[in-house]
Image (cartoon, rainbow, N blue to C red):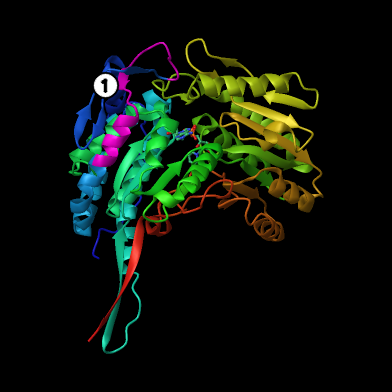
Amino acid sequence: FNVPIPVNEPVKGYAPGSKEREELLQAYKELREQQLDIPMYIGGEEVRTGNLMPVTPPHDHKRVIGNYHYGNASHVQQAIDAALAAREQWSQMPWESRAAIFLKAADLLAGPFRARMNAATMLGQSKNAFQAEIDAACEMIDFFRFNVKYMTDVYKMQPESLPGMWNRLEHRPLEGFVFALTPFNFTSIAANLCAAPAMMGNVVVWKPANTQVYSAKVIMDLFKAAGLPDGVINLVYVDGPEAGDVIFKHRQFAGIHFTGSTGVFNHIWKTIGENITRYRGYPRIVGETGGKDFIVAHKSAHAKEVAVAITRGAFEYQGQKCSAASRAYIPSNIWEEVKQHVVEDLKSLKMGDPEDFGNFINAVIDEKSFDKLAKYIDAAKNDDQVEIIAGGNHDKSKGYFIEPTLIVAQDPQYVTMCEELFGPVLTLHVYDADKFEEILEIVDTTSPYGLTGAIFSNDRYAVELATKKLSHAAGNFYINDKPTGAVVGQQPFGGSRASGTNDKAGSMLNLLRWTSARTIKETF
Ligand code: NAD
């Protein structure tokens, strides 16, 4: 089990005038001017249906930068067949060979693929260069390298034996295929939802979000360049329910690796339940879902630190991180100072195209998301119970731009304090600084989710109290830090309650779900 000791990939700074910035900008401009033809990938073949769907950057939605070939149920069936055909050889391949492919993918991404993967993420998902770098480059590289190490940790889990016998655990791939159903917001998550089961010897059918197909193609190119055999990961672009209809009725369906919204996951879970007698075994259901992530400050907190956490924790990548803070609870004694800093910070943020590296805020992912956010913001504008103290403007004429918006609500149960909006909107409630315990109760019970949250305090008793009272309110809990930015190998990621099965992406806990152990006792 001698594998390279993983080290987190250093984040490039893209300083003005640097070679890395030039390379990235060049890749961005090249991709932008191309009409990329994006086929599906089934059994190693490029599949073109001619049913073309345009790819348009969210920040420039009239520009077509590529077309992807949309498929249907028959392509899902073909992808399952191709996966099952590849299964025997792949599942029996020595783990070192599987590991080598993903280590090579990491090295290729750290080198020649980096600029293209980042540029595709900037264009297709409207991420600025720095957000693309920590997602599409660093996190994806970390997932591959750390998971190789965690894979060996799984294989090392072995029982005791007495003289005269040898007991062992054989960590087998699942019997069938795994369905990777992936969201738009992180290129690295999409890659990992496929790579983690594949690394453990499983074959995969992958359906990305329609708004992520641009970088999905680059991920497939990367896997191919790293030597992944045909059919191990099969990529289809199909309507979600149509794909589900074929997948969840298939006898060989062995598990789903999902990241996306809670509503979709609930629907999938029910569908699997309805079909449970069809399957050979109980499928693995692994899902990371929605959140209503919080920042709660104690009266001992530093106002400036809280303000920085709000600006970065709520508004990076337009608040479209599952971990983004979307509700905050600030004690009355520090509120004026927090307000001054946040409003100043938000005014200084530039919004626009990712090509300009000075733009902190880019566009939200699509028109549906834009319209939903605009509706909540406009409702808040017309509601006497709340006040918008920063932002509030939106414009979709060129791109889906929503200003970072801060709503202050007197009622801690105001609608935008409870529901997941998934955009650059934070709702904040100012509470009586002496009622910390009461506010913790509200934080804990306001939302059904349990993904991320942060406590800011310089009083250790308050930290202890919050840690205890909010035990299940966040699967990733931060003390004196913003609730975003989990790093693979450092903060295993996943939420509880309505936020998912909490199988901690980028850890051994997740990889364990993609094996089925057989106990073997041999007597001598
Ligand atoms: P989504 O649920 O709309 O879509 C996820 C995937 O499911 C997409 O591929 C989509 O096409 C597919 N899909 C949608 N309806 C389906 C159906 N009925 N049957 C089968 N497939 C279907 O999510 P999204 O908008 O792409 O991503 C945003 C959501 O993801 C947010 O709720 C966010 O909190 C969550 N998220 C969670 C985490 C986490 O780690 N907990 C990470 C990232 C995103």
**The magenta stretch spans residue 382:** no
- Residue 429 in view here: yes
* Position of 162 relative to 175 (above/below): below
List x then y, in percent, for residue 60: 43, 15
User: Front-most of 296 and 346?
Assistant: 296
Q: Outermost residue, bottom direction?
A: 163
What quarter of the picture does the N terminus occupy?
A: bottom left
473 sits to left or right of 239: right
32 sits to left or right of 417: left
Query: Which stretch appears magenta?
Result: 58-81
* Position of 413 relative to 62 (above/below): below
User: Front-most of 440 and 463?
Assistant: 440
* Position of 51 relative to 442 (above/below): above
List x then y, in percent, for residue 37: 25, 20
User: Front-most of 300 and 32?
Assistant: 32
**The magenta stretch spans residue 60:** yes
* Position of 52 relative to 142 (above/below): above
Task: Name which residue lies at 44% across and 19% down.
Answer: 353
List x then y, in percent, for residue 178: 35, 47
Q: Which residue is mark 1?
A: 49
